[in-house]
Amino acid sequence: MELGSRLAGTVRPGGRTAKVRAAVLQATQDELAERGFHRLTMDQVASRAGIGKTTIYRRWGTRVRLVTDLMRELAERSLPPPGAGSVEDVLMASARSVLESLTDPHLGVTLQAVIAAAVSDEEAAGALRAFYDRRIGEWARFVDAAVDRGELPPGTDGAELIRAVSAPLYYRLMVVRHPLDETTAARSVARALIAARAGAFVPT
Amino acid sequence: MELGSRLAGTVRPGGRTAKVRAAVLQATQDELAERGFHRLTMDQVASRAGIGKTTIYRRWGTRVRLVTDLMRELAERSLPPPGAGSVEDVLMASARSVLESLTDPHLGVTLQAVIAAAVSDEEAAGALRAFYDRRIGEWARFVDAAVDRGELPPGTDGAELIRAVSAPLYYRLMVVRHPLDETTAARSVARALIAARAGAFVPT
């Protein structure tokens, strides 16, 4: 129900198509949170949403498509890049955004489910690549602007710097399975920034 | 069959118990490579290994336990830390070890399957945490020795530095889904080392 209110603002109001989508994404989120991706089934989602199975199969086809649609929807609700700022401000805002996304009970569960699905599903892998390339590109513009202002060495790869700030957070949460906090985010920014100022993000 | 020969050297020879384990881990690996974790079943593993289902259920209980047993077995076959060396040599060897592990057709598939399983399975998460804490600890000793020799600022956290070198490789392969190569590994080492020399791995 909580997600219902969150999704309500993003799904275009009105038509039956939009209402079906909102109900189905809500049911997908609830099933994902309660049962995990392994045990998510199209039939359960249909039943929970109160929508006919044929509608769901026709519109989404597979559970991976359902979950990637949900991921995109939730991501649009998450905080956008903060606009201009010093490179340190931009990197800290991006690290906080990753921290919040990964620990958000809705978006975090969904992102991790898609990352897990992508290990053995090419369609999920493609959706993930497109999703992160777009999100990282949005943040990288602000790093590129800081490079243009002379805050970092000319030629610094902004997208690569955003990825370097994000990587330790994902790795810590999903691989070595240690808890994430604000300190993790701040350290990641401090380390990447030292390397960036020394020119280590200028491709050779 | 290829894995059979790889496992043959590590599973203690002789007794029936050892033979059962080798056959079961071999079948688990083959099923994992062909079908992925989502579609791995205990029954299929039993059938492929030619071992009774009750034996497999009694000894491993769940498919997560099967896969984590396989992960540990394969990891013992992977290259050990290189012994003493400059901190740059140690970090480069650790980055190469991660690169090789993740792209190895046996160990890479298995590690990624366990990382995926850990998203929705506490037992897999615990096995993963214990596995990486041990592996990272083995590598960190060589960084700690370099710190003692004065190559890095006193108090540098060796385990955290090893994690910082590994993180971009896992993140790139599993999250943003870009290909890994030797350049990725070398850049990760160069960036982490600049930050480490500046004292950014000394806890404050």
Image (cartoon, coloured by chain):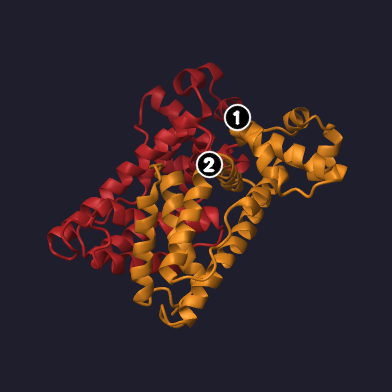
Chain colours: A orange, B red
- Which quarter of the figure has residue B84? bottom left
Residue B200: percent from the left, percent from the top? Answer: 27, 62
Residue A66: percent from the left, percent from the top? Answer: 72, 43
- Seen at 80% across and 47% down, the residue is A13
Chain at numbered mark 2: B
Relative placement, left or right, of B203 versus A21 is left
Residue A34: numbered disc: 1
Relative placement, left or right, of A178 versus B31 is left
Residue B116: numbered disc: 2
Mark 2 neighbour class, 10 Å CA radius: few under 14, some 14 to 19, many 20 or more:
many
Above-or-below relation of B200 to B128: below
* Residue type at the position of mark 2: Ala
Q: Which element is circle 1 on?
A: helix
- Seen at 46% across and 79% down, the residue is A147
Q: Which element is circle 2 on?
A: helix
Residue A100: percent from the left, percent from the top? Answer: 50, 49
Residue A142: numbered disc: none
Q: Give B157 or B53, whichever is nearer the viewer.
A: B157
- Which quarter of the figure has residue A203? bottom left
Q: Are marks 2 and 1 in contact (CB under 8 Å)?
A: no
- Seen at 71% across and 47% down, the residue is A9
Quadrant where the image shows the C terminus of chain B: bottom left
* Residue type at the position of mark 1: Glu
Q: What number of labels is visible?
A: 2
